[in-house]
Amino acid sequence: LEGILFPATYEIYINSTEEEIIKKMLNKFEEIYEKDVKLNINNMDLSLNEIVTLASIIEREGKREDERELISAVFHNRLEQGMLLQSCATIQYVLGERKEVLSNKDTQIESKYNTYIHEGLPPAPIASPGRESLIASLKPAEVDYLYFRTKEDGTGAHTFSRTYEEHLNAKPNK
């Protein structure tokens, strides 16, 4: 149920069963789906599983709400161009831990979730995305960015680039 169990604050009673808790989380996902996803899903060339999977990557990559649509645009643009997504979040999912810096060896781990070696989206979500990431997966910014990297200024912000050369020359502190 990764990706469909909606992350939110819930009122849970002490004697609640696992099934009751799961049902609450699924009902919340259904509520968000009906309100924010259903109307826009027909405009996409992606299935619901692919939308949730993309949203889960956006959720893990983006720390700031104001960048989710830009991150979504990078991944949509890469998918359209047949580029590898190369998402660090998918490697961290495979590793089962969040590493500050991934090694080249990490990016070569054989897994269907490894977007450094397999084209397209992973087969299923890597996290449970929130509402903003779901919306961003459906409504990417209209930009031609293909790359982003985290700024090293403590804000969680990213620098976005159109070309690989720009990406390589991006200053992490600006």
Image (cartoon, helix red, strand yellow):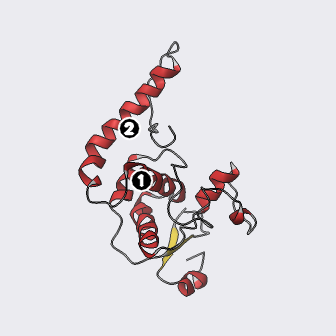
Place residue 65 in its image quadrant.
bottom left
Q: What percent of the width, then of the height, locates residue 169? A: 59, 85
Residue 17 on image: x %, y %: 51, 17
Q: Which residue is mark 1?
A: 133
At 32% across and 43% down in the image, what residue appears?
Answer: 33
Relative height, residue 144 to residue 54 (above, below) = below
Q: Local crowd at mark 2 within 10 Å, few (<14), some, or many (≥20)?
A: many
Relative to 117, does residue 169 appear above or below in the rendering? below
The local secondary structure at tag 1 comes to: helix
**Of tags 1 and 2, which is closer to the observer?**
2
Q: Mark 2 = which residue? A: 29
Work out which quarter of the rendered image holds the C terminus and state it: bottom right
The label number, if any, that marks residue 111 in the structure image: none
Report x, y in % for residue 172.
60, 75
Q: Nearer the viewer, residue 54 or 110?
A: 110
Image-based side of 70 in relation to 157, left or right: left
Decide if residue 130 is on the left or right side of residue 112. left
Which residue type does callout 1 highlight? Ser
Name which quarter of the figure residue 29 lies in. top left
| Residue 142 percent location from the top left of the image | 33, 72
54 left or right, relative to 93: left
Q: Answer few, some or many: residues within 10 Å of disc 1's Cα (few below 14, many 20 plus, some between 14 and 19).
A: many
Whichever of labels 1 and 2 marks the residue nearer the N terminus, that label is 2
134 vs 155, left or right, is left
Asked if the residue under mark 2 is in contact with the one under mark 1, i.e. CB atoms within 8 Å, the reply is no
